[in-house]
Image: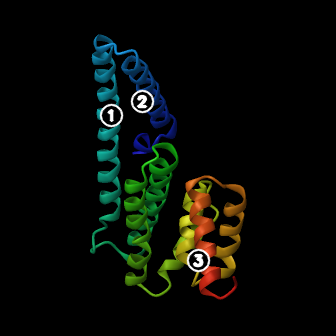
Amino acid sequence: MDDIIDERRIEALMRGLEAVMAELNAATLARDGAAQQPILARMQQIQRQLEAIRIRQDAALTALRDVPETASEDEQVAAWLKAFVFGAKLKHIRSDVMGEDETNNRVARQTYAIAPLLDRIGTGRRAALASLLDHAHPDVRAMAAVCLMKSMPERANPVLDEISRNARGTSAGSTAYWSLSTHRFDSGMV
């Protein structure tokens, strides 16, 4: 499953798409219709590859979030934490690598919706997200911290502060910055 969120592979496809678009632009400006056709074919091939990846990514996130009710509480928590990590990494891919705001926002909503699922299976189960505050991936840390801002501000807010300072211009940095800004505004701290 990690192959569908392999940043290097997707970056290579995106760079390829950018290069083909530059070629198409040059051929269009030169009014070279014969050159445009093979360029368009290459562009469509890359777009089909990216769409196939998107479809697999969405299906994987849906499958990970679909935890059987018959699973024990501990199994459900473990499965939803795995789905949360995947969703946060996918949010990064969609935003920072693919530049897709609309699909990025949908993935973020699906990932954030895991926190209430944890709440429903037992009191304090949302706290399981605290194990992700030390995750290597900044988007995982940022999203987990956002979900814990109200219940564990002493743990969540320093994580968001650090990401906001050190990951500017990224999906994680934006998540951290806006969450803290909104929290401070709502708290009357601004």
**x then y, percent, for residue 70:** 27, 74
Residue 40 in view? yes
**x then y, percent, for residue 138:** 61, 57
- Kindly state the secondary structure of the residue where label 3 is placed: helix
Quadrant housing the N terminus: top left
Q: Amino acid at mark 1?
A: Gln
Q: Which residue is mark 2?
A: 17
**Nearer the N terminus, badge 1 or badge 3?**
1
Residue 152 in view? no
Q: In the rendered image, which quarter is residue 32 located in? A: top left
Q: In the rendered image, which quarter is residue 178 located in? A: bottom right
Q: Which residue is mark 3?
A: 182
* Labels 1 & 2 near each other (Cβ < 8 A): yes
> Could you give the CA–CA distance between mark 1 and mark 3, rounded to whole angstroms?
37 Å
Q: Nearer the viewer, residue 62 or 13?
A: 13
Q: Residue at x 59, y 53 (%)?
A: 170
Quadrant housing the C terminus: bottom right
**x then y, percent, for residue 105:** 41, 61
Q: Is residue 27 above or below residue 5?
A: above
- Kindly state the secondary structure of the residue where label 1 is placed: helix
Q: Which residue is mark 1?
A: 47
**Nearer the N terminus, badge 1 or badge 2?**
2
Q: In the rendered image, which quarter is residue 104 located in? A: bottom left
Q: How many marks?
A: 3
Q: Residue at x 28, y 22 (%)?
A: 41
* Labels 1 & 3 near each other (Cβ < 8 A): no
**x then y, percent, for residue 30:** 40, 15
> Could you give the CA–CA distance between mark 1 and mark 2, rounded to whole angstroms?
8 Å
Find residue 24 and name its label.
none
Q: Residue at x 30, y 23 (%)?
A: 40
